[in-house]
Image (cartoon, helix red, strand yellow):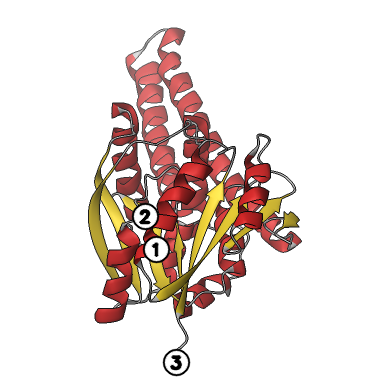
Amino acid sequence: MLKKELISIIIPCFNEEESIPVFYNEIIKISDKMKKVNFEYIFIDDGSYDNTLSILRNLSKKDKRVRYISFSRNFGKEAGMLAGLNAAKGDYAAIMDVDLQDPPEKIIEMYDVLNKEDYDIVALYTNSHAGYSFIRKRLTKLWYRVYNRLSNSKQKQGARDFRLMKRKVIDAIISLGEYSRYIKEIYGYVGFKTKWISYDAPKRTNGTSKFSMKKLIKYAFQGIVATSTRPLLMSIYIGLFLCFISFIAIIAILIKTLVIGGSVLEWLPLASIIVFASGIQLFFLGVVGMYLSSIYLEVKHRPMYVIKETEK
């Protein structure tokens, strides 16, 4: 008798006490339909301060397929996804959000594709996200445009973290040792053949998103810094351009003041140019600082997360 294949479902969680029971009930329905494979459910408690860990303990006692990893503090979603991939024992693995915006029923279709077609990854992307505000939708589209301009690894508009991948893809991802990680870029870096499936993302079933606008903007900057050096080149080009403009402006003001004649107040444009150029310099010094901070974190070789507790 052939051994059943194993699918590892990785679910990062941060203060999701309301969503976990609902998600568990839905994912169990999928495993009941897929009789030819086994499942393990790896929940990552990313330093939650509600009843998330308590719920995971109870689920683990009730269902041996449920595993959990609890961090000593909040390390972020990237750390949670990496911890799940490191712990995954499956022939396949999928990363899913616990809020059911990643429909569990899609796993059936994704698994069929990997078994019947010549693909290593099946990934989802959405053109419509019911849970996003108008402003967030516009900012998300803008983000993908900016990212694809700056990064060597192109991202599909509306790409989700939700994808089912084969074991060789999992091993390739966890073999990368960098501290500053951006999972969507890593998928592009390791390569492998990917099939994209579109869907309309529903609203959250319970609770609210733990990604505030501030966190999203920070994550976006981290994604660019972790994957591209083009902003550094842009700072050089813009710096040279501003130096050229400032030089022309100085010559023009000197000619007008010394040859044509004019009051001292006409030097104000020059002062404005200097202030503008200084502002641009400070901005790109900040960009350089972000790269230096990434290097600093890399050379320290600290782990991306610290585990406080796992299932017994």
Give the foreground label among 1 and 2. Answer: 1
Residue at horizontal 57%, vertical 71%? Answer: 174
User: Residue 198's spot in the image, x, y percent?
Assistant: 23, 55
Tell me which label, 2 or 3, sits earlier in the chain.
Answer: 3
13 or 283: which is nearer to us? 13
Q: At numbered mark 1, what does the secondary structure look like: helix, strand or loop?
A: helix
Q: Quadrant of the C terminus?
A: bottom right
Q: Quadrant of the N terminus?
A: bottom left
Residue 174 in view here:
yes
Q: Residues within 10 Å of mark 2 (few under 14, many from 20)?
A: many
Residue at horizontal 63%, vertical 60%? Answer: 179
Instruction: Name, please, the residue furthest toward the bottom.
Output: 1
Tell me which label, 1 or 2, sits earlier in the chain.
Answer: 1
What amino acid type should be assigned to the residue bearing mark 2?
Answer: Pro
Query: Which residue in the structure is indicated by mark 2?
Result: 104
Q: At numbered mark 2, what does the secondary structure look like: helix, strand or loop?
A: loop
Which quarter of the picture shows residue 155? bottom left
The answer to whether residue 64 is above or below residue 191 is above
Query: Which residue in the structure is indicated by mark 1?
Result: 32
Q: At numbered mark 3, what does the secondary structure look like: helix, strand or loop?
A: loop
